[in-house]
Image (cartoon, helix red, strand yellow):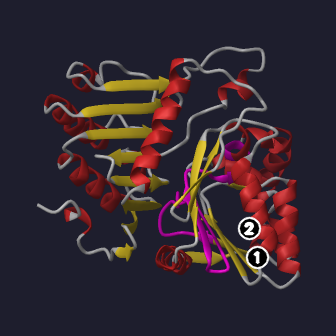
Amino acid sequence: MKRTEAIKEIKVKELRDYKVTLIDSQPDILMAMHDDIALATKSIYLELYRIGYDYTGESFRDILAVKCQQGLTVKILLDSWGTTPSPEFFEPIIKNGGEVKFFRKMKFFVDFFTKNHRRNHRKILVIDDEIAYIGSPNLTGYSATWREICLRIEGPLALILKKTIIDSSKLYDKYIFNKFSYKKTLYFDGFEIIQDLPSIYRQQIKKRYEKLIKGAKKEIIIETPYFLPGFKLRRLMAQAANRGVNVIVIMPRHSDVKIVDLLRDKYLQFFYRNGINLHFYTESNLHAKCLMVDKATFAVGSANFDYRSFRYQHEIVLVGHQPEIVDMVDIHLRESLKGCQPFNYEAYLRRPLIEKIFGWMLLPFRHLF
């Protein structure tokens, strides 16, 4: 049986030493992951924000438990906000020798919201040190119809991503927060692996995006489920549009977090007036997280284009310039645009007064979203 059974109809790009597949359908992503896990012979490392306590989560739990029984090394890192700790649910894995860790249980602090927003939002799967998945999806039926983006990579990069999971595991044992802490960007085979820790001062993914946007010559495409960039990013996007760069933002018309949509809408007039092209994906919920600049540089990973990802969360983004991957990401983005409706400024001005009021009321809390 071939490892790519679930994605046999999806074009695979051959690079030097790599096979890369872009999958953006949640069912196809889950099938591909499940097939690869079923064929694993050595180890499975999974770092994830959310596993659902549903049929999807159960199917992955059960296949992982089987791999534990077969003697494979199985290590799973989950977030305590995204996946509420449930030893009973994961008992089939644990009792067969697998390891399941939860990142930072919710606690009551004086600054309750700030500290509890420091979550692990990363999404990586590494199998046998040979196959890696990195992108936006969680393992849950909740998002069964969502549009995602995920890169399946066969090649030596998998081992590097496995090492980042092992490094994350140390934080689960003893989490020490330092506002000046950061992880160095990893450079390997033409890829950049940018890892963020919660920080006011060291927002490395944001800084890399700022540099890419500042240097753009022709086109910037941002695809994100939650669109709440801070002042500097907003300014750089406006400056890019004003110097003739085609700046495109793809976001869901209605995300799964209504409160974020209300706050996001408060800023849409600024973007519209500065010549930024806003597009709302309407075919389902859009959860993909992606950036493309000048059809030359791509960034795919777990980070949303918002305050919360850049400032409070553990995130990971893969940046590269490989033409084969750039082409796949570009095709994905063009297909996303086909499922979009452009921003209608007149309709925006006529939106209900209550929505405008809520947008203003939420403004002081924008850093929490």
Q: Amino acid at mark 1?
A: Ala
Pick whichever, 18 or 23, lies toward us: 18
Vertical position of residue 304 compared to residue 62: above or below:
below
Q: Amino acid at mark 2?
A: Leu
Q: Please report the residue visible at 77 percent of the width from the left and 82 percent of the height from the top.
A: 217
Identify the mark at residue 208; answer none if there is no mark. none
Q: Secondary structure at mark 1?
A: loop
Q: Please report the residue visible at 79 percent of the width from the left and 73 percent of the height from the top.
A: 215
Q: Which residue is mark 2?
A: 212
Q: Quadrant of residue 73?
A: top left
Vertical position of residue 105 compared to residue 214: above or below:
above
Q: Please report the residue visible at 82 percent of the width from the left and 40 percent of the height from the top.
A: 201
11 displayed left or right of 65: right
Vertical position of residue 87 compared to residue 245: above or below:
above
Marks 2 and 1, Cα distance to the nearest angstrom? Answer: 6 Å
Image spot of residue 229 (x, y percent)? 77, 55
Q: Quadrant of residue 55?
A: top left
Residue 49 shows up from this direction: no
Q: Which residues fall within the magenta stretch?
A: 280-309
Identify the mark at residue 216; answer none if there is no mark. 1
Pick whichever, 69 or 322, lies toward us: 322
| Quadrant where the image shows the C terminus | top right
Q: Secondary structure at mark 2?
A: helix
Q: How many C-alpha atoms fall within 10 Å of the one at disc 1: few (<14), some, or many (≥20)?
A: many
- Tally of numbered discs: 2
| Quadrant where the image shows the N terminus | bottom left
